[in-house]
Image (spheres, rainbow, N blue to C red):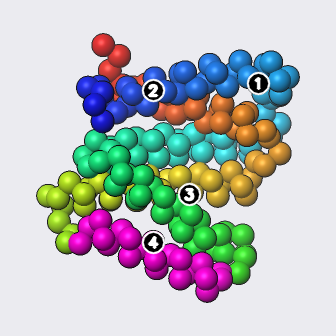
């Protein structure tokens, strides 16, 4: 919140550092970087774009409100996941999951007692919910498609794609 740079530049910097660290780890651990199927490449590209959208909206949530509001709004992603999994993977929706979702929504309503776009917390929650939605879709896409790769390899490709996506939007001076 206190860094006086565009969000795209901050996120790009994080991605470059993460990509370097992940590449070093993958090489030392002798994990593979090869993408085995064209479909896997498409999923890795899509999940990288979703990761970019997730990070940008998350940092925007922090910037317009507070870290606490952003974190609370972002952590609605498990509820989004619970509600979307039955649709995507033909799993049963459990009543307890719905009840937990209601409790989480009640917590969000405490943060935003009055919906008003001029209120910083309302804007922060909306950006945080958008971040949670992108994160949820990214997680479900990876779960349903490319679980045969190591988490380090998946994340490496995602941060590289995120960096490439953000490069045109990130002033570097």
Image quadrant in which you'd find residue 31: top right
Query: Does label 2 or label 3 sit earlier along the sequence?
Result: 2
Q: Main secondary structure of the magenta part?
A: helix
Q: Earlier in the sequence, mark 4 or mark 1?
A: 1
Residue furthest to the bottom: 95
Label 3 secondary element? helix
Q: Which residue lies at the image location 61% right of the left edge and 24% below the top edge? A: 19
Q: Is residue 55 left or right of residue 18?
A: left
Residue extending farthest to the top is 173
Percent of width and height locating residue 119:
17, 58
Q: Which residues are magenta?
A: 93-113
Residue identified by numbered label 1? 26
Task: Give the CA separation, mark 2 to mark 1.
Answer: 21 Å
**Where's residue 102, x and y in %?**
46, 79
- Residue 127 appears in view: no
Pointer 2 or 1: first along the chain: 2
Rendered residue at 37%/26% (across/down): 9
Residue 117 in the image: above or below residue 65:
below
* Residue at image point 25% right, 61% down: 122
Image position of 105 (left or right of 116): right
- The quadrant of the picture occupied by the N terminus is top left
Residue 134, image x, y percentages: 49, 53
Please name whichever residue, 45 or 30, is drawn nearer the observer in this view of the structure. Answer: 30
Is 119 one of the magenta-colored residues?
no
The residue carrying mark 3 is 136
Q: Secondary structure at mark 4?
A: helix
């Amino acid at each position: 919140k206190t860094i006086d740079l565009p969000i795209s530049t901050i996120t790009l910097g994080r991605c470059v550092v993460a990509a370097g660290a992940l590449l070093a780890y993958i090489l030392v651990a002798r994990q593979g970087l090869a993408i085995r199927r064209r479909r896997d490449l498409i999923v890795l590209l899509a999940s990288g774009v979703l990761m970019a959208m997730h990070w940008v909206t998350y940092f925007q949530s922090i910037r317009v409100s507070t870290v606490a509001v952003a974190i609370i709004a972002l952590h609605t992603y498990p509820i989004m996941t619970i509600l979307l999994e039955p649709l995507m993977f033909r799993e049963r929706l459990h009543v307890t999951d719905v009840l937990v979702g209601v409790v989480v929504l009640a917590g969000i309503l405490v943060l935003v007692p009055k919906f008003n776009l001029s209120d910083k917390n309302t804007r922060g929650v909306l950006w945080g919910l958008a971040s949670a939605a992108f994160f949820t879709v990214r997680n479900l896409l990876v779960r349903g498609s490319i679980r045969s790769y190591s988490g380090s390899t998946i994340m490496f490709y995602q941060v590289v794609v995120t960096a490439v996506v953000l490069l045109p939007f990130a002033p570097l001076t």
